[in-house]
Image (cartoon, rainbow, N blue to C red):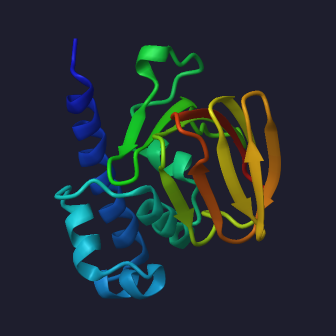
Amino acid sequence: MRQAAEVTDDVDARLAARLAELRAAHGWSLGELAERSGVSRSTLSRAERAEISPTAALLNRLCAVHGRTMSQLLSEVEAEPAPLVRAADQPVWQDRASGFVRRSVSPAHPGLRGELVEGRLAAGADIAYDRPPVPGLEQHIWVLQGALEVTAQDVTHTLGAGDCLRVRVWGPTRFRCAGPDDVRYVLAVVRP
């Protein structure tokens, strides 16, 4: 059985290649992508060479430029999607810098607008996204355990276990672990 670190490294390598492909498909230089995304050329270059594992905030900026959700982008680096996704086969991605772990429970699939993501934030973790990957993205955030603070449209909502927040994302958002323990939640994403 493969170790989690090996699987994560494989995903990072495929993600790096996909980011380079997307930039090339637009005919953009690293400088042009840096201007469009607000991410430095050196960070983009290192991400495309898999020298760094991109953070959630960095991927969000790149998704916004390429008109994709994070799940769509991550599904593009996975093998052919199957209708049944076994727990052991659900792609897991980590933002080690923020303490965010993202499991694609039901990854993006051609012909479907919705997807399910399990999110885990370590105690004290705080992730801010400066824009939605796709304007008008519908999100349903259901907390399974712990406490989560979500800020969307300049309104902060504190959710406990069992609570669900439904929002359409048009601007910046923020996810923060609001309790002393880790938070685990389900994020249902529906593209417009």
Residue at (42, 88) in percent of width and height: 35
The x and y percentages for residue 111 are 69, 39
Residue at (65, 70) in percent of width and height: 172
Q: Is residue 67 visible?
A: yes
Please tell me whether residue 137 is drawn above or below residue 99 in the rendered image.
Answer: below
Question: Quick one: quadrant of the C terminus?
Answer: bottom right
Between 141 and 110, the one lying in front of the other is 141
Between 140 and 109, the one lying in front of the other is 140
In the visual, does 143 lie left or right of 120? right
In the visual, does 161 lie left or right of 43? right
Q: Quadrant of residue 28?
A: bottom left
Q: Quadrant of residue 131?
A: bottom right
Between 86 and 55, the one lying in front of the other is 55
The x and y percentages for residue 108 are 59, 39
Q: Quadrant of residue 1?
A: top left
Residue at (22, 39) in percent of width and height: 9
Q: Residue furthest top?
A: 1
Residue at (52, 73) in percent of width and height: 65
In the visual, does 192 lie left or right of 59? right
Between 4 and 50, the one lying in front of the other is 4
The x and y percentages for residue 152 are 74, 63
Please tell me whether residue 16 is drawn above or below residue 14 in the rendered image.
Answer: below
The x and y percentages for residue 26 are 43, 75
